[in-house]
Image (cartoon, rainbow, N blue to C red):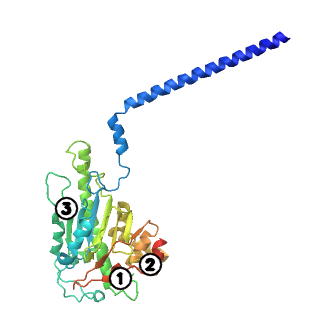
């Protein structure tokens, strides 16, 4: 019996020893295999690729003076007033020079005399010269060998008469929805609002027309049909960022449209009330702000209890359109309206204390 138990102990010890040796050999083989795989991976990746990986940019946010930037557009709209003397120098300093890679698009109305507007202190005899708007394209150098070509009067500007506007928009139809508030004048306030929306829409259409032309060049370059000029400059053939700016204000602070997704000035905002004087941001947010979208939403707006209550009020209408959007209210932006009589609305940049709670809770 004793010899049998000793034999069993010897056999179990031997089997345990064999298992340990087997596990050790298996572990060694796995280590050798992983080392070979690692060596093959290092051989497959060239040193210059490793360097490119370590220095690759993390963000696609527009770099103003580097290639492959996000494509951007600056849209100016409305009725230019004292443009060459007051407005244009501020546009070039605070918008165009701050956004040098952006294309410029303009719509303007061809008025020779400012329309009468007692609310603005304009009595209707102030002379206007719409041709001053051409000066916004000065400084863009023409180079026929490069694509896309720089902004120009013929390609990036549209001027229409008030007669054309009245044919396109039935003002009496919109006047039915006039919001009878104390500070608004019937029908002047609403008519001017529709003119503004129409102007923004026409400039947006002009921008989209150019995009369609540029897409063809873009894809031809991608297929190797033409030299890679545009594809070397931009990440996309469409405008990824768009800014909207009035052409009757003096801009007093720099505005960089690469900073923020959906941005408005901090002033002129109230409860259920969003400023309509300026906007910039990503393309899909800009598409919601542009004028054609507003006309498209009027029927939907008036089916809501909000629309039935507030009627066709510009700032309240925009609040309705953007009430679920992630807006940024930029308190550093400052510009003031300029009247045809060269008077300034200097209180425009002031942020009312009552606004802060509304803005912070957006």
Is residue 172 at all visible to an observer of this figure? no
Q: Residues within 10 Å of mark 2 (few under 14, many from 20)?
A: some
Counting the numbered discs, the total is 3
What residue is rendered at 49% in x and 27% in y? 34
Observer-side mark, 3 or 2, equals 2
Q: Residues within 10 Å of mark 1 (few under 14, many from 20)?
A: some
Q: From this view, report whether residue 177 is shown above or below residue 227.
A: below
Q: Secondary structure at mark 2?
A: helix
Q: Write down the quadrant of residue 144 in the picture.
A: bottom left
Q: Quadrant of the N terminus?
A: top right
Report x, y in % for residue 156.
20, 64
Which numbered disc covers residue 151? Answer: 3
Q: Which sits earlier in the primary sequence, circle 3 or circle 2?
A: 3
Q: Write down the quadrant of residue 175 in the picture.
A: bottom left
Residue that carries the numbered disc 1 in the rendered image = 175
What residue is rendered at 42% in x and 28% in y? 39
Q: Secondary structure at mark 1?
A: helix
Residue that carries the numbered disc 2 in the rendered image = 355
Mark 1 → mark 2, Cα distance in angstroms: 29 Å
């Amino acid at each position: 019996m004793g010899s049998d138990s000793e034999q069993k102990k010897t056999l179990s010890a031997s089997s345990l020893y064999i298992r340990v040796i087997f596990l050790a050999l298996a572990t060694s083989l796995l280590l050798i295999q992983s080392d070979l795989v690692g060596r093959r991976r290092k051989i497959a990746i060239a040193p210059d690729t490793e360097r490119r990986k370590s220095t690759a940019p993390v963000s696609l946010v527009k770099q103003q003076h580097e290639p492959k930037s996000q494509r951007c557009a600056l849209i100016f709209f409305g009725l230019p007033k004292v443009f060459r003397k007051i407005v244009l120098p501020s546009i070039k300093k605070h918008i165009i020079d701050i956004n040098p890679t952006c294309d410029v698009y303009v719509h303007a109305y061809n008025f020779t005399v400012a329309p009468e507007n007692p609310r603005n202190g304009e009595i209707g005899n102030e002379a206007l010269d719409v041709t001053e708007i051409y000066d916004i394209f000065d400084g863009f150098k023409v180079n026929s060998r490069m694509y896309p070509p720089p902004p120009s009067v013929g390609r990036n500007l549209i001027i229409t008469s008030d007669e054309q506007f009245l044919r396109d928009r039935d003002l009496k139809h919109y006047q039915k929805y006039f919001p009878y508030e104390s500070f608004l004048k019937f029908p002047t306030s609403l008519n001017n609002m529709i003119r503004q929306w129409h102007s923004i829409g026409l400039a947006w259409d002009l921008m989209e027309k150019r995009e369609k032309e540029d897409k063809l060049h873009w894809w031809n370059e991608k297929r190797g049909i033409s030299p890679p000029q545009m594809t070397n400059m931009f990440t996309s053939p469409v405008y990824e960022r768009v800014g909207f700016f009035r052409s009757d204000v003096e801009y007093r602070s720099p505005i960089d449209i690469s900073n923020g997704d959906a941005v408005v000035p901090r002033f002129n905002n109230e409860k259920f009330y969003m400023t309509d004087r300026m906007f910039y941001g990503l393309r899909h947010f800009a598409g919601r702000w542009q004028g054609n979208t507003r006309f498209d939403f009027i029927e939907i707006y008036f089916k809501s209890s909000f629309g039935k209550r507030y009627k066709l009020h510009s700032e309240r209408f925009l609040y309705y359109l953007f009430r679920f959007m992630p807006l940024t209210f930029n308190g550093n932006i400052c510009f003031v309206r300029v009247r045809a009589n060269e008077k300034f609305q200097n209180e425009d940049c002031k942020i009312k204390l009552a606004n802060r709670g509304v803005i912070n809770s957006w």
